Image (tube, rainbow, N blue to C red):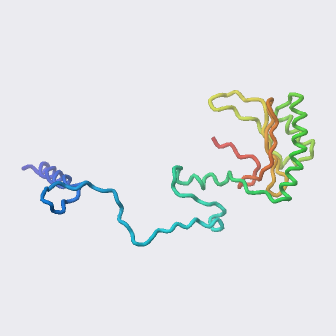
Amino acid sequence: MKPTALVLVLALALLTGCGSEPSSGGGSGAAEAPTNDLPSSTTPSVSVPPDPATTGGVTRSGPGDGPPNHADNNAWKHRPELTAPEAAQANAAASRVRTSLSALRARHEYSPEAARKALASLGFDPDRTEVVAIRPMAGTDDVPPGAAFGIHTGGRGCVIGDIRPEWVRVDVDATVMEGTCLEPFSH
């Protein structure tokens, strides 16, 4: 027999027994169906959730249906709770912003420049105010009229929202974990 044929015969002989367990007597000679049971342990398994203090405030979840580091990669988007003074300061600012931008919308002025000028006229620090154009919908280059804004009002407080022909939206929230009021565009 040629050496290559011998190697093939030996490999085939070794592979014929894979995937089955030997019969435990009984005389039929038929192999039992393989099982997928894992060996059992006599020690119970205990799952302890991670301590947010030791994980930088981020609670990491198990594998689940998401990508391996989905929770870690998106932790920066989570906004903490505002303290009572931060919320009061941001709510007072939001009232002024809503009034000013509603008047701007009534004049059919929705551009980022018009919104930036209106917010500056309210005395907000330009270095702590971000105004950006509304992004086009996916698959189109048409930039819709309007502007999104974020105003850092102190501490972690923010006034965020947008002005468009259809509405003025003004919300109070905290900064994202990286310290900005608006989430940076990523996709």
Residue at point 66%, 67% (across, down): 53
**Image quadrant for the C terminus?**
top right
Which residue is at a point 72% across and 52% down the rendered structure image? 176
- The residue at 89%/33% (across/down) is 104
In this picture, residue 43 sits left or right of residue 24: right
Left/right of residue 123 with respect to residue 2 in the rendered view: right
User: Where residue 123 sits in the image (x, y, percent)?
Assistant: 92, 46
Q: Is residue 62 left or right of residue 21?
A: right
Residue 179, horizontal then vertical, whole percent: 75, 54
Say if 89 sits above or below 167 in the image: below
Say which quarter of the image contains residue 147. top right
Depicted 41 relative to depicted 126: above or below: below
Question: Which one is in front, 7 or 173?
Answer: 173
Q: Quadrant of residue 38?
A: bottom left
* Residue 9 locus on image (x, y percent): 13, 51
The vertical placement of 45 against 83, above or below, is below
The single residue placed furthest to the bottom in the displayed view is 43
Nearest the eye: 152 or 6: 152
